[in-house]
Amino acid sequence: MPKEKIELNIAGMTCVNCSNAIEKVTKKIDGVDDAKVSFASSKGEFYIDTNKVSKEEIKKKIQKLGYSVVEDINALEEQKRRDLNRLKKLFAVAAFSSLGILYLLFFPLKDERLNLYLMAILGTITQFYPGLLFYTHAFKALANKNYDMNVLVALGTSAAYFYSLATVLFPSLFPEHLRYVYFDGASIIITFILLGKLLEENSKAKATDFLKGLIDLAPKKATLLTDDGKEESIEVSRLKVGDEVIVKTGEKISTDGVIVEGSADIDTSMITGESLPVFKKVGDEVIAGTINTNGFLKIKVTKPANDTMLSHIILLLSQSQNQKLPIGRIADKISNVFVPTVIIISLITFIVWFFFAKNTLDAILASISVLIISCPCALGLATPIAIVTAVGKGAKNGILIKSPEILEIIKDIKYAVFDKTGTITEGKISVSDYLLKDDDTEILRLLFLAEKKSEHPISKAIVNFAKQKEIDGDDEVTDLQILPGLGIKCEVDSKEIAIGSLDFLLSLGIKEDQRYTNFAHKEQSKGKGAVLGAIDGEMVAAFSFKDRIKEDAKEMIDELTKKGITPVLLTGDNSRTALSVAKHLGITKVFSQVLPQEKYEVIKKLQNEGKVMFIGDGVNDAPSLQQADIGIALGSGADIAKDAGDIIIINNKLQSVIKSINLSIYTIATIKQNLFWAFIYNALGIPIAAGVLYPIWGILLTPIYAGIAMSFSSVTVVLNSLRLKIKKL
């Protein structure tokens, strides 16, 4: 049987239940072996038998459910923007109408009838303009036997609205003591639920921005060396395996390839995470998107543009984006049982009162009371209000939560995986230690003047170190030679200056001095970089370098361990440096010298053992940030990393990782408390509204008291959620 995997861009999904409904319906189609629909990415994957079903049939089925299918990613993004703008408009209308109703409720007009009519008009606007969204999706859900929050909202608000409308239009049908309106309750629940959806859609709208940004990072043009030796600027996509391109100082390398001429220090930080530029010479491989910091290179193309490492990173990101997070929709799960139960109780209440009490009006009022008291105000507010409060609390603590959904799984994290450069460390090279002949400031001044002419990170570190020692000057530097991967040679004040590796100095005929070389070897054994300095053929200085570990890193790792979370170091840096950093922090699980694909695979393997949180800041971290159950990016990191992460730590403080976990724990606890209180009120109120106390004490809960109970449960939920504002993280 011919099997095929088809991918569709699906627009119009407003909640996880939408994607679940599409999956459920399409799986029933003969010839569909499996279906995976992601609400987060608005994409669907369908595995079909092409002899039984076609792509067009799948599309028609989805469209029949009320969703649209677009072929082009740009069309999908445009549809998402339209949906988001529409949701903003609906929320604005609902909020305005609700405020108007509340004003008329607390500051009524002298003309009571006019006051009621105005409230009815505003209530009608909310119910059938913003509220139409819930009716539409409720009907879809019911058609697929899926009782979700949309059904709950539509049912509860309808009961409150239509009872209120009836009392306004036909007051004579109701005793005077039963002529009450509940337009405020219906409008407010619609407003707050829309607010929650707006937050969700807002994060969805930005979900694919990081892919566009990453594609923009890739060089668009390459300088091709033609057969006659001329240089020609062409599109990178036109490069073929075997072509030769040239890359000058400061340019991005346009292709994955092998150096056939020249040498240079290559900034590979965006791909490997290496904090120091890597010296590349003839025969070494280079990667598209990395930067030639100094030197001239002739590179032979080994991979087409669609098969470079950068293109693979983009592919990994796309694959990760389509995977679903195991997020539980507590209220939706409960509502699948709650909604039909309430309907049944309401019908039973009507039947009992109608046939046994022989009172049609009481039967109607009692059944409506059941629906009103079960109006899901508290249930609908339980999650959105807690999340809104939590997001605000996080922002005040420097934690930007892009998708509120992730708060549900942070508390279950087993592994906290950290990138090293720029995340655990500051990402800036500085002088760690030094050795100068007789601690002479004149020596440091001469070395400072030589290094001042170079843009190499090591040179900058020595210049900054000298400035801290109050060394300065603008003496003329002559005969300057910057040799990539080796060092610097020049003349200052008629003195010959050389700074670089031991091999470089020895090649210049400088005699080795064990005092300085032993210092360099000792520092290198600690995982640090080291260079030597010489003046007029004599070694006079040695410097070691480190990427300083952030001050709050150790405290953060210790707190993670106390919480039972295993910290992991995952870096592209060499093993000596990685192990040195890990030992200092107390991290026992270390993966070093790994490329982005390997980082991605490590995350996947760890996920077999439990939930994984990844914390990074670089472009090379983007696939891992997206693959992990929770991705946390630092605010100082690359835009691509911030787009790929679920959380952005704006203040760059690692302690915010702990605060994120605490915020998750408190938020989920609050939501559970809210749901508990919401159902306690229903558990007590519904039987009373149905009239179980009437035979004993003659108590019948009328709609007004049902409305008070409903409002009281909502106030309780809101106040409980607002406690998060004063909670210490």
Image: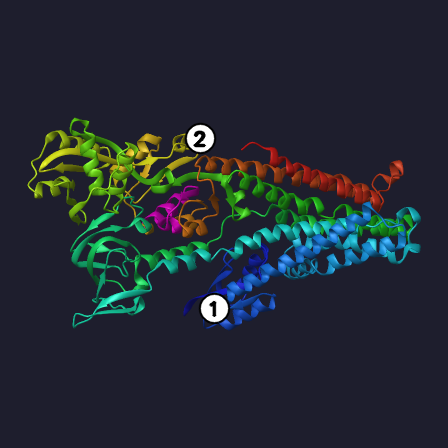
Q: Nearer the viewer, residue 1 or 121?
A: 121
Q: Earlier in the sequence, mark 1 or mark 2?
A: 1
Residue 617 picture location, percent across and down: 39, 45
Q: How many residues crowd around disc 1 within 10 Å: few (fewer than 14), some, or many (20 or more)?
A: few
Q: Which region is colored magenta?
A: 598-623
CA distance separating discs 1 and 2: 46 Å
- Disc number placed over residue 72 in the picture, else none: 1
Helix, strand or loop at label 2? It is helix
Tell me the residue that label 2 is attached to.
Answer: 559
- State left or right for residue 561 relative to residue 181: left
Amino acid type for the residue under numbered disc 2: Glu
Q: Is residue 53 among what the camera can see?
A: no
Q: Residue at x 19, y 32 (%)?
A: 442
Picture layout, residue 103 above or below residue 27 = above
Find residue 531 and report its image quarter. Answer: top left
Find residue 546 and report its image quarter. Answer: top left
Residue 17 picture location, percent across and down: 59, 55
- State left or right for residue 336 relative to residue 238: right
Residue 713 picture location, percent across and down: 73, 40
614 inside magenta stretch: yes
Picture layout, residue 660 above or below residue 622 = above
Q: Residue at x 19, y 49 (%)?
A: 484
Q: Residue at x 35, y 33 (%)?
A: 587
